[in-house]
Image (tube, rainbow, N blue to C red):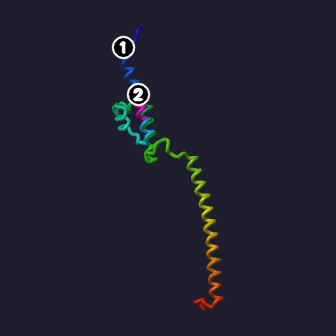
């Protein structure tokens, strides 16, 4: 028995609509645009109500909406991973230690130079302090 042509057409249209919605979802995420039901519906040319009836697509929209809302709508390729953030923090802490050491060394040099300068003035009799 041959399938009903009307059912076949409806199934093709359903799959085409799903693929357009999924593609729109990926493009919005890649571009760093805030992913919402309205944005996906507009980009894919489908209704928001249809998106809500698709559990996998609506779940993906909700996940991406939460992720991009907290990330300030940064494109997916540019979002920092935990490992990269940890590496940046480690590098910043190392640099901070290096600068603290350099600062201490320069303070000692300055104190020594000011002490030498004051000693020189005292020996020459030009020290204004008694």
Quadrant in the rendering for residue 64: top left
Position of residue 103 relative to residue 74, above or below, is below
Q: Secondary structure at mark 2?
A: helix
Mark closer to the chain start, 2 or 1:
1
Quadrant in the rendering for residue 113: bottom right
Does residue 24 show up magenta in the picture?
yes
Q: CA distance from mark 2 to mark 1?
A: 20 Å
**Nearest to the observer: residue 31 or residue 53:** 31
For residue 32, side relative to residue 98 (left or right) = left
For residue 49, side relative to residue 120 (left or right) = left
- Identified at 41% across, 40% down, the residue is 35
Q: Which residue is mark 2?
A: 18
**Nearest to the observer: residue 51 or residue 93:** 93
Q: Which residue is mark 1?
A: 5
Residue 93 drawn at (x, y percent): 60, 58
Q: Secondary structure at mark 1?
A: helix
- Identified at 38% across, 30% down, the residue is 53
Secondary structure mostly taken by the magenta-highlighted segment of the chain = helix
For residue 41, side relative to residue 96 (left or right) = left
Residue 63 drawn at (x, y percent): 46, 39
- Identified at 62% across, 84% down, the residue is 118
> Bounds of the magenta span?
18-25
Quarter of the C terminus within the rendering? bottom right
Quadrant in the rendering for residue 34: top left
The label shown at residue 97 is: none
Position of residue 17 relative to residue 3, above or below, is below
């Amino acid at each position: 028995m041959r399938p009903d042509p009307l059912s076949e057409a409806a199934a093709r249209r359903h799959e085409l609509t799903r693929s357009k919605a999924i593609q729109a979802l990926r493009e919005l995420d890649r571009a760093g645009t805030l992913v919402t039901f309205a944005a996906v519906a507009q980009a894919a040319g489908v209704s928001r109500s249809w998106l809500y009836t698709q559990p996998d697509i609506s779940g993906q929209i909700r996940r991406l909406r939460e992720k991009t809302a907290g990330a300030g709508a940064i494109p997916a390729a540019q979002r920092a991973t935990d490992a990269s953030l940890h590496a940046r923090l480690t590098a910043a802490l190392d640099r901070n230690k290096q600068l603290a050491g350099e600062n201490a060394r320069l303070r000692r040099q300055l104190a020594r130079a000011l002490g030498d300068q004051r000693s020189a003035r005292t020996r020459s009799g030009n020290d204004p302090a008694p």
